Image (cartoon, rainbow, N blue to C red):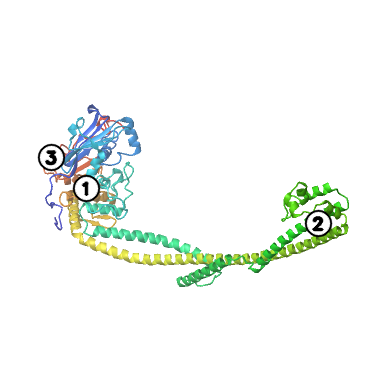
Amino acid sequence: MRTPNLPFASTLPTATRRKPRLWVKELAVYREWKPDALQRQISLRQGLNIIWAEPSEQGAGGHAAGKTTFCRFLRYLLGDSNFGNDTFRDAFRNKFPNAWVVGEVHLDGEPWLVARFAGITGSPHWSAHGVTFEKLFNEGVERQAYADFTRALQKAFVQPLPIEVYPGSGKQVDWAHLLAWLSRDQEARYDHVLDWRSGYGGASSLGDIHSADRTLLIRTVLGLTQPGELEARREHMRILREKSDCDALIPKLTYARERAEKEYRRVMNAPDTTVTESTLTVEKTGLEREETRILGLIREMRQRDGAGDLLPAQRDKLIEQLADLGQKLEDTEADGKKAKLALDFHEGRITQEEYRKQLAQMPLRADQCSAPLELAVAHGCKLAEALHPSRFSEHVLAKLKTTQEALQARVSSLQEQTARLKRDQADAVKEKQRLERQIAVARQKHQERIEAFENDLALVRRKHEATAELLTLTEELDTERRKSERLQGEQRKSTDYQETLRQKATARQSEFSDVFSLLAGRVLQSENRGTVRFQAEDVRLELDYSDLTSTALTTLKILIFDLAALLASARQSAQHPGFLIHDSPREADLTAAIYRRIFDIPKSEELDETEAPVQYIITTTEPPPDHLKGTPWLVHPPFSSTEKARRFLGDNI
């Protein structure tokens, strides 16, 4: 295709196709779903389509006649999420609460009947493949989901692209992004070649994809990328993301390390010590060994109670002695009571019956049965009589009265024995209490030693935690700094590599730039050359023409760029749909003569009155060239805001 140094009179190579891959044949608005509720219908064609809102001395003339509304309905039919801003949609639905936007769209030679509800509530949008507009109200039409139509657009124009997601944003490449380029918002004012949506018109502002992504989309659609370039771009964006993350992390790590070092110096009581990664490593290892040593000591000490074996053994022996003394004291006291009872009986202070009764009530010793012998004999106990035949005989009882002195001596002996046992018992209790105090003191000191080791362990652990934290942050900071330096080098290499790939793609990009230059020459009727330079995150359009203001020249460059892409679609850019809408593109300072020449560019592509490799739709308030004011290029009688019926929607909205 290359034709170097094209003058403005040169022609483009012959188109390689006879029809656009995508074009709209019919667009209609119905007040409700009835054949007789048609509000407006516009039939479109391949090639040039002009929607003219003619000026008038009354009212707003060409403005507010509905040109932009027509474009938004057309975009809505092709997949935009809505058809205007909130204010317009509310006003439209208030006027037409049950409205439908319908049309016939041709995709790769096949018709699609598309219907989208535009009212307040109603049926879902739908489509029908292979069906033409004439069958819109035919009940036999097999309706499909509207999403089937947009999926077909995605499959036709996006899936074949060499990218599935944008390397810059990571967003999925979507038909809506391409549609935005092919149908710029009028509110975007044609200020920049990459500004496609203003957001004011109710459509997405495309803020979810970067300028680099839009540039890449244009280049891939136009077939201007070099093999390996997209992979290089993805790798470059990966490097940039990692570098950005790294550079954002380094200040945070620096701040965290400064705080950690301050805590380290406080815990270690080392305000002036030089802190390096190696010293921290040695310190951390030493603290870990110290922690292990102290833990071993604590575990060993917890296996003992601190009192040793001697003191508890002495205490236990005393406990046994006290138990023996207690038993002896109990037995001696019991014997003393019985001896005193016998003395009382001997001296006549109690009767024999009282003696026996009191004796039966006394507690028994371990070697006694549950009843006194006297009571057992009195009740005829054979065992008692056999074992003690003479103990309770009348003779013995009588003899007790003759042994007063012996009884008195026994009572005194038992009383002295009882007193001695009590003294021994008291001494044993004191000794036991002394031993228990010694044991308690030993255990307390042992526990205090354990607690001291535990305090040492806690301090070692605090030191270890502070050291480990500072060491970790030091290592992470050092790692991130080295990583940042490495990524900086990779970024430079990646940038150079991409530039090398772009230079290799220069030939094809130069061909497209030549088309841009050729069209600029035709429009300006001059030999001034224009160029298109594709950069990583921008598309630079250059056109030296001093007779226009910068604003008018910017608008003109964007129009020519879009038209160059449209015409290239019929020759070398198979993924461009060959479809383009320009909504009121004339900038006030753009002269009428230059502006009107734009219309001839798509007109020159027409093979005859019904066939062209592209479809170009332009709305205008400026009158089109005289030779294009009639059919078939003026696809509808001029609209006007001076009369309600002459507005696009036939009513005031």
Q: Is residue 309 or residue 56 the one in the foreground?
A: 309
The residue to which callout 1 is attached is 157
The tag earlier along the polypeptide, 3 or 2, is 2
Q: Is residue 495 or residue 158 the one in the foreground?
A: 158
Mark 2 or mark 1, whichever is nearer to me: 2
Amino acid tagged 3: Thr
The residue to which callout 3 is attached is 610
The residue to which callout 2 is attached is 336
Tell me the quarter of the image containing the N terminus. bottom left
Whole-number angstrom distance, CA of label 1 to CA of label 3: 24 Å
The tag earlier along the polypeptide, 2 or 1, is 1
Q: Residue at x 57, y 65 (%)?
A: 303
Q: Residues within 10 Å of mark 2 (few under 14, many from 20)?
A: many
Q: Residue at x 24, y 63 (%)?
A: 500
In which image quadrant can residue 71 be found?
A: top left
The tag on residue 381 is none
Residue 577 against residue 467 in the figure, above or below: above
Amino acid tagged 2: Gly
Whole-number angstrom distance, CA of label 2 to CA of label 1: 123 Å
